[in-house]
Amino acid sequence: MNIDILNFILRAEAAAQPTAQQQADMTGQFISSIVVMVLVFVMMYFIMIRPQRKKEKEAKEMRDNLQIGDEVTTIGGITGIIVRKGEDTVVIETGGDRSKIRVKTWAISENATVHDIQEEAVKKK
């Protein structure tokens, strides 16, 4: 009876040990799963992250190029003309009674005034 138990244990251990072919298959699966994950991250970068960064860069450039006299629209939808520009704020004049509102530069969402530099760039194209 002891021999039967010993044989059973030895067979179970032998079955638990993966063969060289099984180890190669597992390594191949591991490498292919890593490659798939890398491809997913690369696709996410080109589909989501890169366009967002490009849009943020364009918005920052627009805000850096604001000048007095530009007609702008804020994130909240207020439209006016810039009458004073500070380091991180601008004062816009809006409405028929010429009300002045001070807003942060990051709150400017659109510059409706086209400058000569932009017109020249369009003409060159």
Image (cartoon, grey):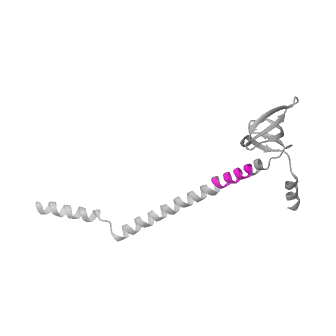
In the displayed structure image, the side of residue 68 where residue 12 appears, left or right:
left
In this view of the protein, which residue sits in the foreground, 24 or 112? 112
Give the quadrant of the N terminus.
Answer: bottom left
In this view of the protein, which residue sits in the foreground, 71 or 77? 71
Q: Name the residue at 16% across, 62% down.
A: 6
In this view of the protein, which residue sits in the foreground, 90 or 62? 90
Q: Name the residue at 83% across, 37% down.
A: 80
The magenta stretch spans residue 118: no
Q: Name the residue at 87% across, 62% down.
A: 124
Specify the quadrant of the image occupied by residue 119. bottom right
In the depicted structure, whether residue 86 falls above or below residue 115:
above
Q: Residue furthest top?
A: 97
In the displayed structure image, the side of residue 93 where residue 41 appears, left or right:
left
Residue 72 point in image, percent of width and height? 81, 41
Q: Name the residue at 40% across, 69% down.
A: 24
Specify the quadrant of the image occupied by residue 4. bottom left
Residue 94 point in image, percent of width and height? 84, 34
How many labels were placed on the picture? 0
Q: Residue furthest bottom?
A: 20
Residue 40 point in image, percent of width and height? 56, 57
Numbered range of the magenta stretch? 49-60
Q: Residue furthest left?
A: 1
In the displayed structure image, the side of residue 46 where residue 99 appears, left or right:
right
Secondary structure mostly seen in magenta is helix
Give the quadrant of the C terminus.
Answer: bottom right
The magenta stretch spans residue 59: yes
